[in-house]
Image: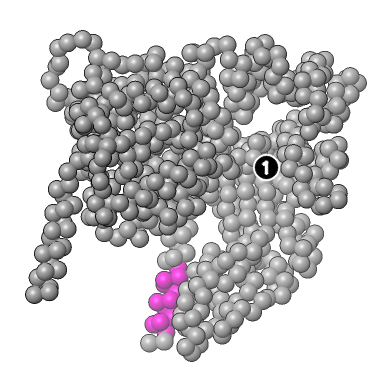
């Protein structure tokens, strides 16, 4: 009798996992086992904020909130969703069970327009409203084995950010304080069926919001191409070649099955996204340079400069990326431009001095170093630069 | 039965070692990008334990092995004396990288000395990467059992003796000396990093650790060579990117 009751309970539990009602209003109350997932997500939310991993650009935040507002009416509109940008150069986006949606700066920096952004957000919103974390939690089998693999991936990602705190390192530090389901979803995504559900429902949201759905498969193709060109192992779902291939196939099928819709031209939003992302592109380029990913950094800086051509800081970073890539001549031109635009940029003056010195242009080196010392009289390396100035005055370094 | 148990333990250990070796990729960037980016490598002085019987000889032996292998792959190798000379010069100009009173590191001066040393070696020697090698002590795993065989990354070896009931109380690791090799670009971004075991520094005997004297750890040339070869295996692999 007891055995039969246990079987019945197990069956009920199985049914519960497959018959969850979607989250469609702000007052939604999670089930007891779901509450643990929400608590875990809130722990991670808090840690991300405390460690200043969240981008605090209010204009970008307002822009993202606006895109979410366009997407959510079919889901009920009144949803406890909070979209945030993580200062992290890896390609990823994820929704947590409590409605927190995170976009990594690395992913945002590679999106071309608002329709593509809406595609990623639509996909993630569906993971939240359809309670995919809870479904995964209730059906997952060997969480321990899965987590050993996941933590191996996270360890690689934590090491890859060149000493900076990133999302992977934070999750490793938090350890058991976060549910394995929450961590695993960020790294590996969900089951193939749940991902396809997020594709289909998310695609419908993008279409209903008036976006150009032809852009939907392009965002994943774009990421896949970027991934192939960079030839860098990325740790997360949106950096995984097979997972991106699945998304492309899935969205192309959805696009092909969609009847032609008459009416006004759908929204693409290229300029709007470019304006909103302009500051983020530079921040993320700086992180890419630190990781040695100079070609990615240069692409982002050039996108920024296309929108804001007279930003001296962007030209300085361009110089840094070019110098790290081994192109000293192009780097010098970029630093020159940075100094032209911002005569008070001490770092650019110093880099110019070092490049001139390396090339044996003593007078130019002397002038640049003198400018650096004038702009940064208390610089730590002043004694070294003073030696370089004297060398230049005497006709060059030994 | 006993021979069978030995074989099973051996097979398990070999499988663990093999699986570990297959999974680990020391490159932090794609291998072909590394090959395109790195041509001239400056060595930094090898970090060795102060209690090694002859630290200078150990340092020289490791540097010679590294130089021979890296050079054979076609890289230009700049000896650590070049780094040491420039570093000393920069450090002196900055008034030292350690506080003379407290002995604490002076982070800003250290950063500036590092940056200007790399830039100077780039200018004078065409250096585009730095190789740092150092010995450190860390946990070294081994399998629990009647014969505590290593599942470490050195050749299979006996790590301790556990007989009687304490067999189930034995720890899953002892301590070992590792040789770590890190190759970084001039901004300090790690491009390649790996460590390989040299020798146990403490073995588990009965219910406690028995420390080994340093002479037993660092005076065996074959072990030093095995650690260097292990660390540089992927860098100098025959099938890898040729210079």
Name the residue: 54% across, 33% down.
A287
Residue A63 position within the rendered picture, expressed as x and y whole percent measured from the top left = 39, 22
Quadrant of the rendered structure where residue A128 is?
Answer: top left
Name the residue: 43% across, 17% down.
A274
- The residue nearer to you, when weighing A134 against A194, is A134
Residue A220 position within the rendered picture, expressed as x and y whole percent measured from the top left = 32, 30
Residue A72 position within the rendered picture, expressed as x and y whole percent measured from the top left = 25, 28
The answer to whether residue B98 shows anywhere in this view is: yes
Name the residue: 31% across, 27% down.
A68
* Farthest residue, direction bottom: B164
Quadrant of the rendered structure where residue B126 is?
Answer: top right
Stretch of the chain drawn in magenta = B3-14
Q: Is A17 inside the magenta-drawn segment?
A: no
Name the residue: 62% across, 48% down.
B182
- The residue nearer to you, when weighing A121 against A220, is A121
* Farthest residue, direction front: A27
The secondary structure type at the circle numbered 1 is strand
Q: Name the residue under label 1.
A: B130
Q: On the rendered image, what quadrant is the C terminus of chain B found in?
A: top right
Task: Please give the chain letter of the residue carrying mark 1.
Answer: B
Q: Is residue A165 left or right of residue A385?
A: left
Q: Is B4 inside the magenta-drawn segment?
A: yes
- The residue nearer to you, when weighing A96 against B168, is A96
Name above or below for residue B226 compared with residue A98.
below
């Amino acid at each position: 009798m007891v055995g039969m009751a246990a079987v019945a309970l197990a069956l009920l539990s199985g049914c519960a996992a497959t018959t969850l009602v979607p989250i469609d209003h702000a007052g939604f109350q999670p089930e007891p086992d779901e509450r643990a997932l929400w608590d875990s997500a809130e722990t991670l939310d808090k840690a991300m904020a405390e460690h200043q991993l969240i981008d605090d650009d209010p204009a970008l935040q307002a822009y993202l909130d606006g895109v979410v507002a366009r997407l959510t009416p079919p889901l009920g509109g009144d949803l406890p969703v909070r979209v945030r940008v993580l200062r992290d150069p890896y390609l990823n986006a994820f929704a947590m069970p409590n409605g927190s949606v995170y976009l990594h700066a690395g992913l945002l920096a590679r999106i071309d327009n608002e329709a593509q952004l809406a595609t990623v957000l639509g996909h993630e919103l569906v993971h939240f409203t359809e309670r995919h974390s809870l479904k995964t939690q209730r059906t997952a089998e060997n969480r321990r084995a899965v987590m050993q693999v996941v933590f191996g991936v996270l360890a690689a990602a934590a090491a890859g950010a060149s000493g900076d705190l990133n999302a992977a390192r934070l999750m490793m530090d938090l350890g058991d304080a976060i549910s394995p389901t929450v961590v695993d979803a960020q790294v590996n995504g969900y089951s193939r069926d749940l991902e396809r559900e997020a594709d289909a429902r998310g695609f419908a949201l993008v279409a209903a919001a008036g976006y150009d759905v032809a852009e939907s498969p392009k965002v994943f193709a774009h990421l896949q191409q970027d991934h192939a060109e960079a030839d860098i192992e990325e740790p997360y779902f949106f950096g995984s070649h097979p997972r991106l291939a699945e998304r492309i196939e899935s969205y192309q099928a959805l696009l092909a099955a969609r009847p032609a819709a008459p009416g006004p031209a759908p929204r693409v939003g290229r300029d709007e996204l470019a304006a909103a992302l302009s500051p983020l592109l530079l921040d993320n380029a700086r992180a890419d340079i630190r990781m040695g990913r100079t070609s990615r950094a240069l692409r982002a800086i050039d996108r920024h400069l296309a929108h804001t051509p007279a930003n001296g800081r962007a030209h300085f970073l361009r110089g840094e990326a070019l110098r790290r890539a081994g192109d000293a001549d192009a780097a010098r031109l970029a630093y020159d431009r940075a100094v032209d635009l911002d005569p008070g940029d001490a770092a650019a003056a110093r880099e110019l001095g070092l490049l001139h010195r390396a090339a044996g242009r003593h007078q130019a080196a002397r002038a640049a170093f003198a400018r650096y010392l004038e702009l940064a009289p208390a610089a730590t390396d002043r004694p070294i630069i003073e030696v370089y100035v004297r060398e230049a005055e005497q006709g060059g370094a030994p | 039965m006993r021979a069978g148990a030995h074989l099973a333990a051996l097979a398990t250990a070999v499988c663990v070692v093999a699986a570990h070796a297959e999974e680990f990729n020391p490159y932090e960037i794609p291998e072909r990008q590394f090959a395109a980016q790195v041509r001239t490598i400056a060595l930094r002085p090898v970090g060795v334990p102060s209690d090694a019987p002859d630290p200078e000889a150990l340092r020289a032996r490791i540097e010679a092995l590294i130089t021979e292998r890296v050079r054979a792959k076609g890289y230009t190798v700049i000896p650590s004396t070049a780094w040491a000379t420039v570093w000393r010069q920069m450090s002196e100009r900055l008034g030292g990288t350690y506080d003379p009173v407290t002995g604490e590191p002076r982070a800003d001066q250290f950063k500036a000395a590092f940056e200007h040393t790399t830039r100077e070696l780039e200018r004078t020697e065409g250096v585009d990467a730095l190789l740092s090698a150092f010995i450190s002590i860390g946990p070294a795993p081994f399998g629990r059992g009647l014969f505590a065989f290593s599942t470490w990354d050195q050749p299979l070896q006996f790590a301790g003796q556990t007989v009687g009931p304490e067999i189930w109380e034995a720890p899953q690791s002892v301590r070992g000396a590792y040789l770590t090799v890190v190759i970084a670009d001039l901004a300090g971004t790690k491009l390649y990093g790996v460590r390989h075991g040299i020798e146990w520094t403490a073995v588990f005997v009965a219910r406690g650790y028995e420390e080994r004297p340093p002479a037993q750890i660092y005076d065996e040339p074959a072990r030093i060579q095995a650690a260097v070869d292990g660390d540089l295996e992927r860098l100098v692999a025959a099938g890898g990117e040729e210079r």
